[in-house]
Amino acid sequence: MVVGKAQTQPIYNIPAIRNYRWSTHLDLLRGLASLLVFIGHARLLLFLEYSEISNPSFLIKRLNSLTVLGHQSVMIFFVLSGFFISASVIRRIQQKQWSWVNYLVDRLTRLYVVLIPALLLSYFWDSLGIKIFGTGQDSFYGEKFHNGHLATYKILENLTFQNALGTIAFLQTIFVDLFGSNKAVWTLAYEFWYYILFPAIILFFCVKSLKARVFYAFLASGILLMVGSEIRMYFLVWLMGALVSICRPSKYLKSKNILNLLIILSVLILGIALISERFISNREIGDFLIGIITAVIIYLLVNSRSQIKQEGAYEKFSKSLAGCSYTLYLVHMPILCFIRACVIDDRPWEPDSFHLFLGLIIVVFVFLYAVVIAHFTEAKTDNFKNIIMSWIKNRRLNQA
């Protein structure tokens, strides 16, 4: 009877999510998506555009297919974020434990514990690169960063206090430009406003007070008007994850063999969609397709209720990769740009065996650099959150 009840409750109400094996699979998915963004930027910075390569080999064709998935991987991030954040929001509201203070401390601690060090490191690497290589026409920090496929601006133009402050306020791409060479920060403006928008919409329908409803209506409307059409559009992708969180596990997916077959099939479809999206003339359609397939994969995985009895190599690897994924996402671009300026004079590398090996060394080095930073930032998120919550609690007691 207990199992039956667990099967009928909505997914957002599943207790102890981390005890389930599907959580490990989602950790792996999040970590791999971050790696694809990182590797895609490394390819753009170090190697010739695929269209400039004469007679590419089979290996180069496959590597190209693997390293052009950065934007598509962000859609996976959005759906995963929508799933986990919405589940937390709805569960707290349903259990009458909702608190904007606790929620914002959770979210802002998670964001700022990496974002602020990432912006400082961006300033350090970009300033060092500008000082060493200058900003002339032949410098990567001058004209060569502004080269069409990589960026539409020069690094020095965007390395301003205004852009840094706007990024801390999550207003990049809305009211300010991206900060320096760190193009990856664009998604944080999307994510942060989704974090505020979703509970505002849910609370509008849940609260009884008319004043509160009017407030949440104005809050949600104001955000939707402020953020612009693109952020509004991708909120629909984010909501695909939220839709999964309010679904119930299906009674038709109790067969382990059928469920595993559907999971494998959906993962294959996702792989095909990721590779083929660039051939779809309308990018938004491709993005929505990836969002839908990712949501289906999450739903299928959640229907598998196998629990982790003992943490093995797979669980440790997935957890470790996911544990540094946010840091890797935010810190890789500036140091990659600096390395690019150091090792490449004019023309990016041909993807021959020697330069592919050098590229692999650089990728491993930058990944380890991110892992070290994550150890002092992302891994300490709960510690920082506990310190802030203790300070808030003590302040309330003193005021009382």
Image (cartoon, rainbow, N blue to C red):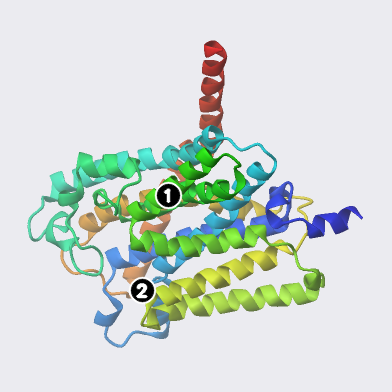
Q: The C terminus is located in which quarter?
A: top right
Disc tally is 2
Residue, x 60% and y 55% (percent of image)?
318
Relative to the observer, which residue lies in front, 131 or 378? 378
Q: Is residue 31 above or below residue 276?
A: above
Q: CA distance from mark 1 to mark 2?
A: 44 Å
Going from N to C along the chain, the mark reached first, 1 or 2, is 1
Is disc 2 placed on a helix, strand or loop? helix
Q: Which residue type does callout 1 highlight?
A: Trp
Q: Return the x and y of residue 27 as percentages of the image width and height.
A: 59, 56
Q: Which mark is residue 353?
A: 2
Q: Which mark is residue 16?
A: none
> From this viewpoint, is residue 351 visible?
yes
Q: Is residue 22 above or below residue 168?
A: below
Q: Quadrant of residue 5?
A: bottom right
Residue, x 27% and y 75% (percent of image)?
49
Q: Return the x and y of residue 69 as percentages of the image width and height.
A: 42, 70
Q: Return the x and y of residue 382 as percentages of the image width and height.
A: 56, 35
Residue position marked by numbered label 1 in the rendering: 193
Q: Is residue 254 above or below residue 112?
A: below
Q: The N terminus is located in which quarter?
A: bottom right
